[in-house]
Amino acid sequence: MAITLEEVRHVAKLARLDLDEGEIVYFQSELNALIGHFSDIQKVDVSGIVPTSHAVVMQNVWAEDIAEEGLPRVTALRNAALHRAGLFVVPQIIED
């Protein structure tokens, strides 16, 4: 299957490309060469190859989600600048 000059003109019009005749002829030869490469690839026997979704093996590296005891409140508040009633006291940032 070869690309015709009319098809190149049509695609150029759809892509809103203003090509002159020399560029149209150039792109026709380039597209025909590309189609030739595709036909070469289609001839390759891949019947014994298992399809893959990625070129390399992909796996999750997530750690197990294990619930553990948290930091004790006294330890968490030890370095706080201000704390009251077991809570952190922070400056107000929203004005009334």
Image: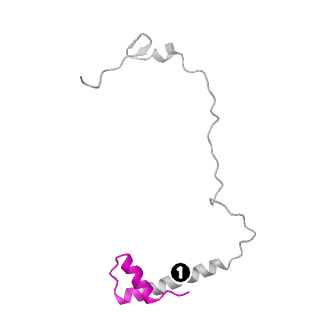
- Tell me the residue that label 1 is attached to: 34
Counting from the top left corner in percent of width and height, residue 47 is at: 74, 71
Disc 1 residue type (three-letter): Leu
Q: Residue furthest left?
A: 96
In-front residue for pair 7/18 = 7
Identify the residue at horizontal 72%, vertical 67% (top origin). 49
Counting from the top left corner in percent of width and height, residue 86 is at: 45, 12
Counting from the top left corner in percent of width and height, residue 20 is at: 34, 87
Depicted 83 relative to depicted 2: above or below: above
Identify the residue at horizontal 44%, vertical 85% (top origin). 7
Crowd class of label 1 (few under 14; some 14 to 19; many from 20; radius 10 Å): few
When asked about the image quadrant of residue 11, the answer is bottom left
Residue 64 is covered by the magenta coloring: no
**Which residue range is magenta in the image?**
1-25
State the predominant SS element of the stretch in magenta: helix
Q: Residue furthest right?
A: 48
Tally the numbered discs. Answer: 1
Residue 16 is covered by the magenta coloring: yes
Depicted 6 relative to depicted 17: above or below: below
When asked about the image quadrant of residue 72, the answer is top right
Q: In screen coordinates, is 24 left or right of 76?
A: left
Q: Residue furthest top?
A: 85
In-front residue for pair 94/79 = 94
When asked about the image quadrant of residue 88, the answer is top left
Q: Helix, strand, or loop for circle 1? A: helix
Counting from the top left corner in percent of width and height, residue 10 is at: 40, 82
Identify the residue at horizontal 61%, vertical 40% (top origin). 62
Q: Quadrant of the C terminus?
A: top left
Depicted 75 relative to depicted 42: above or below: above
